[in-house]
Image: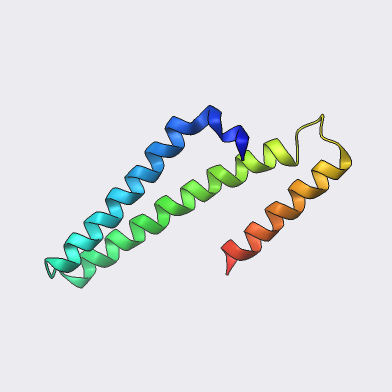
Amino acid sequence: MGHLHANTDSLTARVRRIAGQLAAIEKAIEADAPCATVLQQAAAVRGAVNGLMDQLIEEHLREHVARPDLSPEARASGTEELLAVIRRYAK
């Protein structure tokens, strides 16, 4: 996804926040935090990953499927790539 270079800072910041959330879960588990606390943190990570996936899917769709100057072959390839990811993501 070479087109992501335009949003590298934003995407990297999102990934770092997710990494921080995961580190907080690890610390909570090691500190024997209450189950509800760990569950809330895990739910927050899931939401953050879902938000990252939404952004990546949108950017892929715009760049590799919807861009007006794409050839039919490139559009079909971008569509198949996106479908494969969505199938895997939806499991």
Is 73 positioned to the left or the right of 53 in the image? right
Compared with residue 5, is residue 40 higher up or lower down, i.e. above or below?
Answer: below
Residue at screen point 68% across, 42% down? 61
Residue at screen point 61% across, 36% down? 2
In terms of image quadrants, where is residue 30? bottom left
Toward the right, the furthest residue is 72
- Can you say which quadrant of the picture contains the N terminus? top right
Identify the colour scheme used: rainbow
Residue 15 image offset from top left, x and y in percent: 40, 45
Residue at screen point 57% across, 62% down? 89
Toward the left, the furthest residue is 31
Compared with residue 64, is residue 86 higher up or lower down, i.e. above or below?
Answer: below
Residue at screen point 86% across, 37% down? 71
Count the numbered circles shown: 0
Residue 31 image offset from top left, x and y in percent: 11, 66
Residue 55 image offset from top left, x and y in percent: 54, 42
In terms of image quadrants, where is residue 36? bottom left
* Of residues 28 and 36, the one drawn nearer to the viewer in this rendering: 28
Residue 32 image offset from top left, x and y in percent: 13, 70
* Of residues 68 and 6, the one drawn nearer to the viewer in this rendering: 6
In terms of image quadrants, where is residue 62? top right
Is 65 positioned to the left or the right of 72 in the image? left
Is 33 positioned to the left or the right of 79 in the image? left
Toward the front, the furthest residue is 2
- Can you say which quadrant of the picture contains the C terminus? bottom right
